[in-house]
Image (spheres, helix red, strand yellow):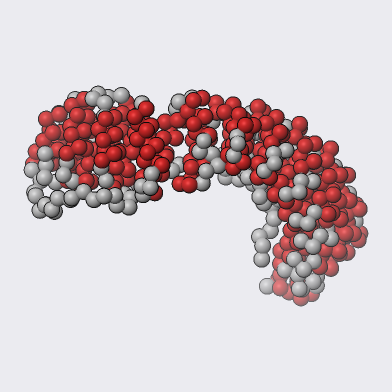
Amino acid sequence: MKNMRDRRPRGLWALGLLAPVVLLCCVASGCREQPKQAQPAPQKTAERPAADAEVLAALEKGEQVSLAQFKHVLASASPQDRSEVLSRLALVEDPSGAVALAIEVLEHDPDFSVQASAVMPLTIALRQGLKPDPTAALLRAAKEKAGPVRVAAVQALAWAKGPEVEAVLERARASENPTELRTQALKSLMAIYARQGLTGWRKLTGFLGKTKDDQSALAAIEFTVTGRPTVPVLIETLATGQDAHQREAAATVLATICAGRTKTSLAFGKRAKYLAGMSEREEPPDLRAVEPLLRALNDPYYPVREAAALGLGFLGDARAVEPLGKALEDPAMPVRRRAASALILLPAKPVIPALARRVRTDESAAVREFAVEALGWTKDLAAVQPLIDALRDSDADVRAVAADFLGDLGDKRAAEPLTRLFNDPEVDVRWAAVRSAGKLGGEQVCLALLNVYNDSEQPSQVVQAADDALRRMGHLVTYSASDKEVLRK
């Protein structure tokens, strides 16, 4: 049995969505093998010297150590000790000397796991601008090393600069290398582009719409994290992009970035409770996206029109109401569905006739359901008759949503049609009809509710709804003798 409804329109994305996705690359997992380098023969575990133990204990406590002590542990026979001391490079008194030693370890240590461990502190050195600059060593590792060492070096290069860095990453991501290496090269390259401003953002748009190695999704993440400064570039791509998939992705990212909090969305969220447990955006929507998205409603590729309709709902601007009303007649069902769902979040009174046509004639139950919701949220009496008509819909969800809203509109015309649904085949529909009819009141409704209450074949939640409705109307149910005996016990 379906859960009882909480006025939660399905298919709508949460506003301000798109909290940024955090993608982690686990270096230790490595990737499928590249041309193998000879691994040294396993060494017997040697007992840790006392001096090394003292240094590692000090590092564990967060105490600084000298460069000489750091170097001594790096000469240890234990790969574990070498890796551990490398992870604490920031605690060495001479940072430059420590960076130089880490570079040497990356290039010459016989153990691949230790080489990989050297990359993380070198990444920190790169971000903090420490000398000597590890970029050249990381580039060599990205070109010459294998497995997890190469992947780690490629990841670190996200913080490097220069044309050679971009060229190495571009070759790695465009090759037939293992997927993990290609994906990491792609992430690093995109991170570099995201920091380059307009020039880099235009390069970043070249990945939108491309599915190989999740290029489009990763580019969308970079745009979303960078935020509204990228809006002009996305508008440009939406207007001039030659690839339809690229325009679709640009419209979606633009809508995501420009979404914000409006009076309509706040009221909707409070009543529908679909924002429960989620953070809301404090900022208002960025209305620079309205006109580009309105133009995109005429794009020849229907997914672009669908994405544009979705975005216009997020922005909540009244300029979109009439165009979305026209989009309700779009030949593509996904566009009609998205236009109807967008109108839930907009002042849709001017397009009530268009919504009513969808309720009565659209072949898609999803379109009819969203159109019913949009009509209900207008809170206008002109929506009552189309909603009454929807009570006869072949789809149970449409009937239930229509019944739910009719009680809130408070029009007595709905009383008799609602009571006819008290014996609907679907429990959700009966539950919604009983609740709404109770809000309308009247003798006819009261008698119908008493019949529901006394019907032993009704499920408990429907009976409880009838009892609640009767009490709200001022009627206490008269229990039968058997009922009283059960209650007494």
**Of the pair 268 and 98, the residue shown nearer to us:** 98
Q: Where is residue 376 in the image (x, y as percent from the top left)?
A: 79, 47
Answer left or right for 32 relative to 92.
right
**Of the pair 418 and 156, the residue shown nearer to us:** 156
What residue sits 19% from the left and 29% below the top?
A: 100
How many numbered circles are shown? 0
Q: Where is residue 269 in the image (x, y as percent from the top left)?
A: 67, 42
Answer left or right for 411 relative to 31.
right
Please tell me in which quadrant of the rendered image residue 366 appears: bottom right
What residue sits 8% from the left and 43% below the top?
A: 49
Query: Can residue 68 be seen from the camera position used here?
Result: yes
Q: Where is residue 402 in the image (x, y as percent from the top left)?
A: 80, 54
What residue sits 34% from the left and 29% below the top?
A: 164
Q: In this view, does 191 lie above or below 329?
A: above
Quarter holding the N terminus? Answer: bottom right
Please tell me in which quadrant of the rendered image residue 68 appears: top left
Quarter holding the C terminus? Answer: bottom right
Query: Can residue 62 be seen from the camera position used here?
Result: no
Outermost residue, bottom side: 482
**Of the pair 318 and 455, the residue shown nearer to us:** 318
**Of the pair 298 and 426, the residue shown nearer to us:** 298
Q: Position of residue 20 (x, y in %)?
A: 51, 39
